[in-house]
């Protein structure tokens, strides 16, 4: 019973989501499925394989190790490493045919050297900072760095991109400002005679609501997994959540009025209550912040979590569920209980809940052939 918690991943939902996104952006625009952080907790390899079959032409990862694992598993599609690298990682980029983000001249020489070792050009994407102030060259330096890239015989300028800071907000003023700054950089490159095959800026939210930002390629993460970027974006396509986390009731106990539950006595029963214990806690990625705030589904009914969430257990008030016994199925989130409902409870985003789900929770894949 202690190992009854699992995450069911519906690969058919992944396929349908990718097809819906592709239908929105059209055939001329490339779709990059972002599978960093182990596919937002869904499994990078499994998601990547289905995404490519369903219309994605690119995969996005955070670092070269993630790209290497996908290559070793047989994925041949283009893969972009979205973060800058340490010098020692350049060898992985070269050996596994990855495309690499660059944001400064500092890594160009080491990439060029590794490219010449394997006698192949390394494809690079120049990242431009248009207002996120996180990564990327400043707009005024973009032309200079692009010229430096072209000066290295082992490198190929495959793409130029930027990233939105507020595309998932209702007010798109700053997003449009960023887009115009990016377009100005592209115009500067074009006037200098620099051809860029792939220009990209749109994330999930911009793909939905800023069609003018789609350009040559869109980088879509959260929507691949069937979750909308925020409650402020219009749901212009239908998505299916791919992950449902389930567990089972481990034990049932009666709690008398005035008695308390779990550490710190943070919950006191005002009247007689029936309490179910489930094998899920912060050790599995179910954060302690949910204590006395969250709820679960049993037989389609919401039941509140009570007391402090423990490392590998938490308590539910199941007083209203008749004849409940150990072994009863409990939905943590997913089917019937959207993950963004839970993230709203603790002031975070659905991305964090999905990515936090620990590897101690086994993934159970429902294949598209089933």
Image (cartoon, helix red, strand yellow):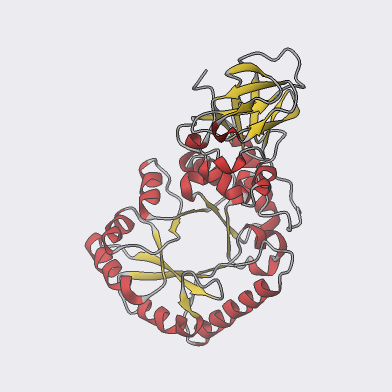
- Where residue 13 appears, as percent x and y from the top left, is 64, 38
Residue 366 can be seen in this image: no
Front residue of 273/43: it is: 273
Residue 207 can be seen in this image: yes
Of all residues, the one furthest to the left in this rendering is 117
Front residue of 268/220: it is: 268
Q: Is residue 314 above or below residue 343?
A: above
- Where residue 53 appears, as percent x and y from the top left, is 55, 43
Of all residues, the one furthest to the front in this rendering is 258
Q: In this view, does 146 lie to the left or right of 330?
A: left
Give the quarter of the image for residue 79: bottom left
Q: In this view, does 16 lie to the left or right of 145?
A: right
- Where residue 26 appears, as percent x and y from the top left, is 67, 58
- The residue shown at (39%, 55%) is 63
- The residue shown at (35%, 62%) is 85
- Where residue 242 appears, as percent x and y from the top left, is 62, 38
For the C terminus, the image quarter is top right
Q: In this view, does 48 lie above or below 267?
A: below
Q: In this view, does 39 lie to the left or right of 120?
A: right
- The residue shown at (64%, 68%) is 213
Front residue of 253/102: it is: 253
Of all residues, the one furthest to the bottom in this rendering is 191
Front residue of 312/160: it is: 312
The number of callouts visible is: 0
């Amino acid at each position: 019973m202690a190992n009854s918690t699992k995450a069911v991943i519906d690969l058919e939902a992944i396929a349908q989501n990718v097809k819906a996104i592709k239908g929105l952006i059209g055939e001329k625009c490339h779709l990059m499925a972002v599978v960093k952080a182990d596919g937002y907790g869904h499994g990078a390899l499994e998601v990547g394989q289905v995404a490519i079959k369903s219309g994605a032409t690119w995969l996005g990862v955070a670092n070269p190790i993630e790209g290497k694992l996908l290559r070793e598993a047989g994925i041949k599609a283009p893969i972009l490493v979205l973060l800058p690298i340490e010098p020692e990682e350049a060898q992985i980029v070269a050996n596994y045919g990855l495309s690499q983000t660059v944001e400064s001249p500092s890594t160009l020489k080491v990439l060029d050297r590794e490219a010449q070792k394997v006698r192949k050009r390394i494809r690079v994407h120049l990242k431009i900072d248009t207002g996120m102030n996180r990564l990327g060259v400043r707009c005024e330096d973009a032309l200079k760095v692009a010229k430096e890239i072209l000066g290295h015989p082992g490198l190929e300028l495959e793409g130029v991109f930027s990233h939105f800071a507020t595309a998932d907000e209702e007010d798109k003023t700053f997003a449009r400002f960023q887009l115009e700054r990016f377009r100005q950089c592209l115009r500067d490159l074009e006037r200098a005679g620099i051809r860029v095959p792939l220009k990209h800026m749109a994330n999930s939210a911009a793909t939905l609501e800023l069609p003018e930002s789609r350009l040559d390629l869109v980088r879509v993460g959260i929507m691949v997994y069937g979750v909308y970027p925020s409650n402020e974006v219009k749901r212009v396509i239908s998505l299916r959540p791919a992950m449902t986390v389930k567990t089972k009731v481990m034990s049932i106990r009666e709690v008398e009025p005035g008695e308390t539950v779990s550490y710190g006595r943070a919950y006191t029963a005002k009247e007689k209550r029936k309490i179910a214990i489930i094998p899920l806690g912060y050790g599995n990625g179910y954060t302690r912040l949910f204590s006395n705030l969250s709820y679960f589904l049993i037989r389609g009914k919401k039941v509140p979590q009570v007391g402090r969430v423990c490392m590998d257990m938490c308590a539910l008030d199941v007083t209203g569920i008749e004849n409940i016994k150990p072994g009863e199925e409990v939905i943590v989130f997913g089917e019937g209980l959207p993950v963004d409902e839970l993230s709203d409870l603790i002031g975070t985003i659905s991305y964090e809940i999905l990515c936090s789900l620990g590897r101690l929770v086994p993934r159970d894949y429902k294949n598209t052939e089933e």
